[in-house]
Amino acid sequence: MGKKGGSRHLKRKPAPKSWPIHRKEHIWAVKPKPGPHSLSHCIPLSIVMRDILQYAKTRKEAIAIISRGKVLVNGQIRKEDTFPVGLMDIVTIPDAEEAYRILPAKKGLILQPIKEEEAALRLLRIESKTVLVEGRIQLNLHDGTNKIIGAADPEDAAGDTYQTLDVVKVTVPEGEITEQIRLQKGASAIIFGGQNRGVQGRVVDVEEEAGKRRRSLLATLEDQTGKSFQTILDFIFVTESGEKTTSESKVS
């Protein structure tokens, strides 16, 4: 009888290079379960607790901590050590009074310590939009979740203010949109893909070319030292904008 479904196991050698694990000490690694992030763009909770934060020395100890509800991801208790955390997720450990945001770095993903008030808001990028009945708009976000909003003009659904690759701020854990950050000149952003992954700076130029897919357009970022970096818009995640739009639409 032929094999059905994918493998439930993962060896350390083919595991994502961004994971901070030793490749030759042991054979097997923790394979994250299917979830909001793909295998190459996530870290399982057990590796976060054992290898990054070092709250545990073995996977068994990490499972014991996680299964007791000691770890929250985006404001929700996660009891599976294989749960995947990825870009812009918020990992909170209430007993230790610590919170972290998952950010891209040169070699993969890192946990950036944040304050309690910062952990109450999460950034989500709009990957695509779908026009629904009665002029309502469905925003498809980078973590696989969707938000249904009312259009600015019910008779003109195309006239809503949300654009693909913009970012919305949502409350944790309610998920209500509080603010929109546009991908435009002057916005603060971070590069999460390509050769310049992990670079943070300000968008100083965005290419404009008719007939070309917006994701493939080039953008130039300038870091704090004045050095310029160029990448495609598909690899840019805006984090702050000089001109912010507060959402007046009700999220369903």
Image: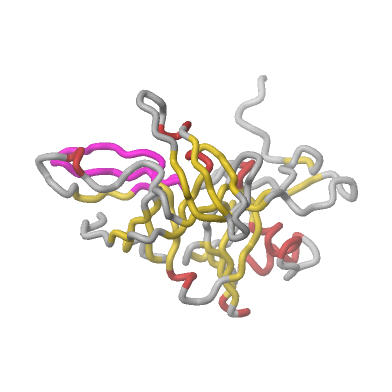
Q: How far across and down, in percent of the image, does residue 23 sit?
A: 85, 46
Q: Is residue 209 visible in this depiction of the protein?
A: yes
Q: Which residues are magenta?
A: 126-146
Closest to the observer: 147 or 156?
156
Tell me if residue 83 comes above or below residue 230 in the rendering. below
Quadrant into which the C terminus falls: bottom left
Is 11 left or right of 83, judged from the image as shown? right
For the image, the number of numbered tags is 0
Is 225 left or right of 166, judged from the image as shown? right
Is 125 left or right of 89, judged from the image as shown? left
The residue sitting at 68% across, 60% down in the picture is: 48
Is 218 left or right of 160, judged from the image as shown? right
**Looking at the image, which residue sits at the far right?**
25
Q: Is residue 140 magenta?
A: yes
Q: How far across and down, in percent of the image, does residue 156 sit?
A: 13, 39
Q: Is residue 144 magenta?
A: yes
